Amino acid sequence: MTAATGERATTALAHTIAREFGTPCAVVDLDRVDANIARLQARCDAAGIANRPHIKTHKSPEIARLQRQAGAAGITCQKLGEAEIFAEAGFRDILISYNLLGEEKIARLARLARRADPIASVDNPVAVEAAAEAARRAGRILPVVIECDTGRKRAGVETPAEAVEIARLIRDAGGLEMAGFLLYPPEGGVPVTQRFLDEATAGCRDLGLPAPRIVSTGGTPNLADLGRIAGTTEHRAGTYVFNDRMMVAAGAATLADCALTVVATVVSRGGPTRGILDAGSKTLSSDTGKLDGFGLILEHPEARIHAFAEEHGFLDLSACAAPPQVGDVVRVIPNHVCVVVNLQNRLVATRGGRVVGEIPVAARGRIS
Amino acid sequence: MTAATGERATTALAHTIAREFGTPCAVVDLDRVDANIARLQARCDAAGIANRPHIKTHKSPEIARLQRQAGAAGITCQKLGEAEIFAEAGFRDILISYNLLGEEKIARLARLARRADPIASVDNPVAVEAAAEAARRAGRILPVVIECDTGRKRAGVETPAEAVEIARLIRDAGGLEMAGFLLYPPEGGVPVTQRFLDEATAGCRDLGLPAPRIVSTGGTPNLADLGRIAGTTEHRAGTYVFNDRMMVAAGAATLADCALTVVATVVSRGGPTRGILDAGSKTLSSDTGKLDGFGLILEHPEARIHAFAEEHGFLDLSACAAPPQVGDVVRVIPNHVCVVVNLQNRLVATRGGRVVGEIPVAARGRIS
């Protein structure tokens, strides 16, 4: 099949999907998903590191099963509500990379710990106490990793000394296992992260704690550094499963690796240089990912999605030699696929150029 | 009750909600909703204009029933999928302020027209043909309004001459009633919109069409202009029902009119001037509404939500004399409430300072 034939075939498929499912419609190419999954798994295998994919990107047990079948060891969830959905679907080894606090979360974490094997993450004493209380209620030892911030200025303790202090609290809380460290190294942050990890590990040894059994790194954009931090036992990548315009911009993927497109229709024009898609911020999200424009239209790469209303995507067509017309069906690669998936109730799945089913976004909206 | 007592009471309520429902949690104060609904209805009544609220803001038949009980005549939906949900819930008079195109939409619009009384909107010949085909399949006359753009550069024909040309197509299509015009006047756009409307109406008269029975204006930020365009028969406001930080910034509401808050917990700190909320872009949306920061924390108005991860809100606390601590529960007024509601599975409803139930966001995610 030539490139042109392939292009015609995918355009024809987009039209079929538009007719059958309506637009806008998020479509997942499972052949590309398989390839993305296999590629990361091979990299983890080659590095001797376990693969613990982050499900925030797809929020779907069906996709997670593909990851597991390919060799993933456990999953990562960002919210307890996601972990509950995946536990119901039969997943047991679930790292929750998020501080869980407060009575309601403690009660739910305890319930989860009775039917699955969650690993909690903490970066502060309140979260340590909450984990310990959940462990008591569940009547079991709860493994805990310490989230460390080595430069991203997101969550996590900011110094090895703080990490060691948290480790001491975990050791003394009762019911908790100090299982290791949760890292999300910044781009170019291998040396600083290595120093942090080594110092924190040494401090924990001084507390009489065993060597960490989990040293978990994260991220898709920084996959080039996979395994370069000595002591790493596992990696949590999320976006790699679908990829998006941000990953292409970061050099972590090519357009051919992007497995999710939003099929949309041009529903209005308004002058020779304007156009309007039926996909706005409630479909493609206002998350620009710091890129220019809100997505890439594969059929009209020179068109720019320059603004959104809630259900409209506003196109600047001034650079288009052959601008799209009202009724035209196009495919959009979103800037940030994780937030786009969370806006969908279902994904339409294709394989071999044919629709093979619908995948519910089972954990969509599980923000708590 | 003094202001301080009131403040303590609402803070206590937020803590009760956090314990019972967990955070983040979108909470709707139905007393404020009632007041917002009554205020707009009174303004519409005083102007002699029908009130056709846009349900995109709440996506909930329960809230729409409150609007109807207060006097609303019909509703507005942006997507066909919303209209279907509301038709199932017993609403009949539904204006869909959106071009509907393509076989899948035609089939659904025809089905909808058999069990409800939709009014279609069009701004181009393809949408006229689609409406006519839906009318044929439904075996009934379908009323159609022409969307006109009088300066916002969103959807809509851009000149009265184009409107008249669309009216001619509607007249000649068969099965359609040319019912009138759909306007969304820009701020300060009364004179230009009036001229547009008058010219388009005159042109339609020349085509032998009766005077428009629907001249629908829209918007909450421009409510100050309500009824100032002669010939207006109805208004479509959406955001007024909850209000948000954008409406406060636009002078269309006060903070006391904001009926929806997101109750969130501080889950991490990281240095004296940083803090992290458990509400990120998957809860509060990346839609800034062109405001500084991603929401207003009522308990710490001097804190700035300066960035989001998907499940984290990053706080700059450098201006806080008494910064929030890990575990603190706070209430956030979102920048743009419509997109926030669309991210929730349910809203927790309060009345008289007590939780009275949960409201499903029934049409959430109905993007098609």
Image: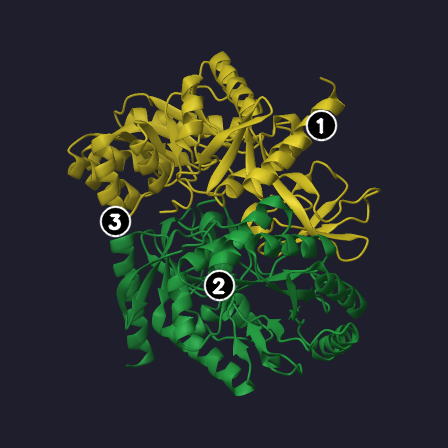
Chain colours: A yellow, B green
Element under disc 2: loop
Answer with the quarter of the image where residue A107 lies: top left
Q: Nearer the viewer, residue B108 or B196?
A: B108
Asked if badges 2 and 1 are on one and the same chain, I answer no
Q: Which residue is mark 2?
A: B55
Element under disc 1: helix
Kindly identify the amino acid type of the residue bearing the numbered disc 2. Ile
Kindly identify the amino acid type of the residue bearing the numbered disc 1. Glu
Q: How many marks?
A: 3
Q: Residue at x 38, y 21 (%)?
A: A73
Q: Are the residues tagged 2 and 1 within 8 Å (C-beta)?
A: no
Whether residue B44 can be seen here:
yes
B94 vs A260: above or below: below
Q: Position of residue A155 (x, y in %)?
A: 43, 42
Q: Position of residue B301 (x, y in %)?
A: 45, 66
Kindly identify the amino acid type of the residue bearing the numbered disc 3. Glu
Q: Which residue is mark 3?
A: A104
Q: Position of residue A259 (x, y in %)?
A: 58, 29
Q: Are the residues tagged 2 and 3 within 8 Å (C-beta)?
A: no
Element under disc 3: helix
Q: Residue at x 49, y 70 (%)?
A: B74
Disc 2 versus disc 3: distance between alpha carbons? Answer: 32 Å
Badge 1 local density, few (<14 within 10 Å), some, or many (20+)?
A: some
Q: Which residue is mark 1?
A: A7
